[in-house]
Amino acid sequence: KRCEATVADLRFAVMEMDEVSLEKQTAFWIKCIELKLPVAAVIHSGSKSLHGWMRVDCGTDCEMWEKRVKGFLFNNFGIKYGVDKACSNKARLSRMPAHKRENKGEQTLLYLNGGC
């Protein structure tokens, strides 16, 4: 079962911007990487969005998640760039590379930083 209660370790937040052009999304993620923000991966959805995995390392601390992820990452930082606030939940799923979506393209890994 997928729900917030089943999440054991709050390591990553998934960010996406469906309402922003792919060109602007690409510029956003390039800038985040240039600024050395903890971007672990960027995956093209095979359609209209890039999904970014931000390393947040909140462990099991839900209060830290609320502050770091919902408070700063989504509400203060991300809102300026069109990040979808609905994606700020702990059990958010993301696209995975190499999966072919029906009537859409293949999901592609664009960036990976295992040591972020």
Image: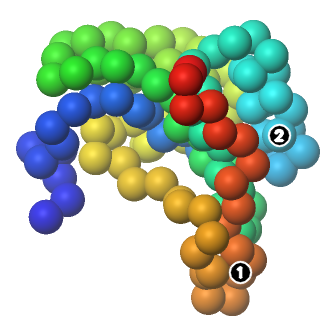
Please, what is the three-letter code of the amino acid marked with disc 1?
A: Lys
Q: Earlier in the sequence, mark 2 or mark 1?
A: 2
Apparent side of residue 39 relative to residue 1 in the rendered image (left or right)? right
Could you tell me how far apart the alpha carbons at marks 2 and 1 are, in whole angstroms? 19 Å
Q: Residue at x 17, y 17 (%)?
A: 61
Residue underneath mark 1 = 104
Identify the element where label 2 is drawn. helix
Of 115 and 70, nearer the camera is 115
> Which residue is at the far left?
5
Q: Residue at x 83, y 48 (%)?
A: 21
* Position above or below: 81 against 42: above
Q: Which numbered dot is residue 66?
A: none
Q: Residue at x 74, y 77 (%)?
A: 105
> Which residue is at the far front?
115
Q: Specify the quadrant of the image occupied by residue 16.
A: top right
Which image quarter holds the N terminus?
bottom left
Q: Which numbered dot is residue 26?
A: 2
Q: Residue at x 48, y 40 (%)?
A: 14
Q: Specify the quadrant of the image occupied by residue 44.
A: bottom right
Q: Position of residue 58 (x, y in %)?
A: 28, 18
- Structural crowding at the residue carrying mark 2, measured as other residues with C-alpha within 10 Å and reported as few (<14), some (14–19) or many (≥20): some
Q: In this view of the protein, can residue 80 be seen by the observer?
A: yes
Please, what is the three-letter code of the amino acid marked with disc 2?
A: Thr
